[in-house]
Amino acid sequence: MPPLAITRSGTGEPLVLLHGLGSSRQAWDPILPALAARFHVIAVDLPGFGDSAPLPGAGEVPPAALAQSVADLLDDLGVSTPHLAGNSLGGWVALELAARRPVASLTLLSPPGLWRRNVPLYDRISLRASRWLARHATGLLSRLVTFRLGRVLVLGQTHGHPMRLSAGYARAAVETLGRCPGFDAAMAGTARRRILAVLPPGTPITAPVTLAFGSRDRLLLRGSRRTGQLPPQTRTEALPGCGHVPMADDPAAVAALITRTATQATRTAVADGTSA
C-alpha cells in the first residue's frame, strides 16, 4: 500500500485530522496553530487526495478501505490511541477507524453517510458538477474566485462565509478538487453505503463522539442527517454560521470544539482509571 502524506506539528496527545472528499490535509491549516498548541497533530492526506497516491487497482474505495490505510499509517508511526477529527468524508472514515482500533475520542464535522439508504440525488449531482467544473474549468474558476462574489458562486455551497475567504484559499480548494485522482473511486465507495451505529467488523464504538453541523451547510441537508445511526453516546453541538467545511469559516470555534471533546475524553479516562 502506498504511503500517506502527512503533516506533523505540536506536542502532546496524538490527534489525527482527516479531510473530506476532494480536499486535502491543507483544509485543516486554519486551525493547525491552535491545535498544535495542545496536541501532537497528524494531518493526513487520504489515498488519492493531496500528495497521497491512490490505492492500486481500486475502482471503488469505500470508507472502510480508507480507514484501513490510516490504521496502517498509525501502526507505522507507533500511534496507538489517538483522538480523531474528521470533516465530511473524513468523519465517516474516522468512525470506520474507531470500529477497528482503539481511539480516545471522535469529533465529526459534517459527516456524510447518515442518509436513509443511498447518497441523495441532490448530493450526487452537486458533487459531480463541482468536480467536473474544478477539473475542466480550473483556470476560469481560479480567476473567478479572485473576486468576492466569485467566491460566493464557487464556494457558497460548502462554506458559510465565502466572502471572508482569501483568494489564495479559494484557488487552492478549486485546484485540489480538480486534480485529486481518488475522487471518483471514493465517491463510488459511498454511493450505496451508509453509517451504522455498529460498523464492520461488528465492534461497538465506545469512545466519546461529538457531532457538529454548520448552520449554513448547504451540501448535507436535513434529510441527510439521520443521527440515530451513530453510537448512542454521541453528543451533538452546533457551529453557527459555518458551512460544510467549517474550519475556514470559524477556526476558533472548530479548534475549541475538537479540544473540548478530547479534553473531556481524557478526563473521563483518568476518572475511570483507563488512561495510559
Image: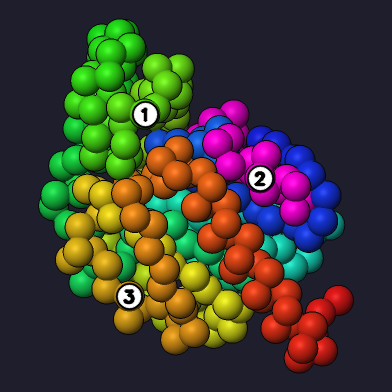
Q: Which residue is mark 1?
A: 164
Q: Nearer the viewer, mark 2 or mark 3?
A: 2
Type of amino acid under label 2: Ala
Q: Residue at x 74, y 68 (%)?
A: 81
Q: Secondary structure at mark 3?
A: helix
Type of amino acid under label 1: Arg
Q: Secondary structure at mark 2?
A: helix
**Marks 2,3: beta carbons within 8 A:** no
From this view, report whether residue 118 is shown above or below residue 6. Answer: below
Residue 181 image offset from top left, x and y in percent:
44, 30
Horizontal side, residue 149 vs residue 2: left or right: left
Name the mark on residue 34: 2
Q: Residue at x 45, y 38 (%)?
A: 248
Quarter assignment of residue 265? bottom right
Sequence-wise first label, 3 or 1: 1
Residue 86 image offset from top left, x and y in percent:
51, 55
Name the mark on residue 227: 3
Is residue 141 in view from this perspective? Answer: no
Counting other residues with Cα less than 10 Å from the Cα at mark 3, is it few (<14), some (14-19), or many (20 or more)? some
Q: Secondary structure at mark 1?
A: helix
Residues rendered magenta in the picture? 29-54
Horizontal side, residue 41 vs residue 241: left or right: right
Who is closer to the viewer here, 103 or 54? 103
